[in-house]
Amino acid sequence: MAIGTAALGLLALLLGCSGNSAEAQNSSKCVLSGNWTNDLASTVLFGSVSNTGVFSGVYQTAVSSSGETIPPSPLQGIQHQRDNATFGFTVYWNASKSVTVFAGQCFVVEGGKELLKTVWLLRAEAASREDDWGATKVGTNTFYRTK
Ligand SMILES: *[C@@H]1O[C@H](CO)[C@@H](O)[C@H](O)[C@H]1NC(C)=O
Ligand SMILES: *[C@@H]1O[C@H](CO)[C@@H](O)[C@H](O)[C@H]1NC(C)=O
Ligand SMILES: *[C@@H]1O[C@H](CO)[C@@H](O)[C@H](O)[C@H]1NC(C)=O
Ligand SMILES: *[C@@H]1O[C@H](CO)[C@@H](O)[C@H](O)[C@H]1NC(C)=O
């Protein structure tokens, strides 16, 4: 009550300014390192990103075509190091002898939240060359940072 609205206004201004400058200086946005989850409730952990943009990680899928639980699966990727960076990574599905390649872009949206818009190709192992035609699936996923 004793604090005037002018003082509150000044405080808000100071907080606002420090928030903005911290955001402007924060180069960690769209560095993919950390935990993410997607619209299917699959989770992915990206490890540290090297100075050449290379990273590895672990993908825990919530869905599988077999209906069986898939163990955490390794991935390797590379990203650009800039705002709204594009990136790609490949997940190695050991049990099904298949791979999924993801290509995507990170976007920093309202409130500084990051999301990853991706398209993927899942390549299953074809039993023969004649079966090659139907061995690839395509889809999209959006990932949200959880940590
Ligand atoms: C940058 O942002 C990340 C994630 O939002 C946060 O963890 C980190 O503390 C911030 N760094 C600075 C210097 O503000
Ligand atoms: C990040 O993901 C890893 C691997 O799934 C998990 O062990 C860890 O607890 C997660 N961290 C957080 C903060 O969710
Ligand atoms: C793949 O699975 C096989 C059979 O379970 C196992 O022996 C092998 O160590 C696994 N390889 C990798 C790279 O996880
Ligand atoms: C990054 O993407 C966000 C969300 O679409 C957009 O508002 C922002 O202008 C973009 N930033 C840059 C530097 O392209």
Image (cartoon, grey):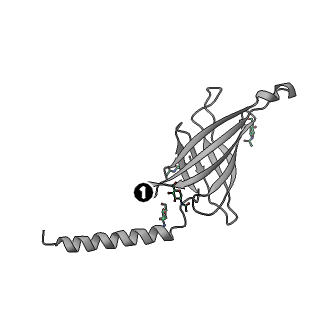
Rendered image quadrant of residue 123: top right
Q: Residue placed at 69% from the left, 52% from the top?
A: 77
The image shows a total of numbered marks equal to: 1
| Residue at the limit of the structure toward the left, as seen here | 1
Q: Nearer the viewer, residue 112 or 100?
A: 112
Tell me if 30 is positioned left or right of 79 in this view.
left
Residue 97, horizontal then vertical, whole percent: 75, 35
Q: Residue placed at 46% from the left, 67% from the top?
A: 23
Q: Nearer the viewer, residue 95 or 84?
A: 84
SS at badge 1 = helix
Q: Can you say which quadrant of the picture contains the N terminus?
A: bottom left
Residue 58, horizontal then vertical, whole percent: 63, 47
Label 1 beta carbon within 8 A of ligand 1: no
Judge whether 24 appears above or below 110 on screen: below
Residue 117, horizontal then vertical, whole percent: 58, 47
Rendered image quadrant of residue 30: bottom right
Q: Residue placed at 54% from the left, 64% from the top?
A: 28
Residue 102, horizontal then vertical, whole percent: 67, 45
Judge whether 27 appears above or below 91 on screen: below
Tell me if 127 is positioned left or right of 111 in this view.
right
Please, what is the three-letter code of the amino acid marked with disc 1? Gly
Mark 1, residues whose alpha carbon is within 10 Å: few (<14), some, or many (≥20)? few
- Residue at image mark 1: 111
Q: Residue placed at 52% from the left, 39% from the top?
A: 39
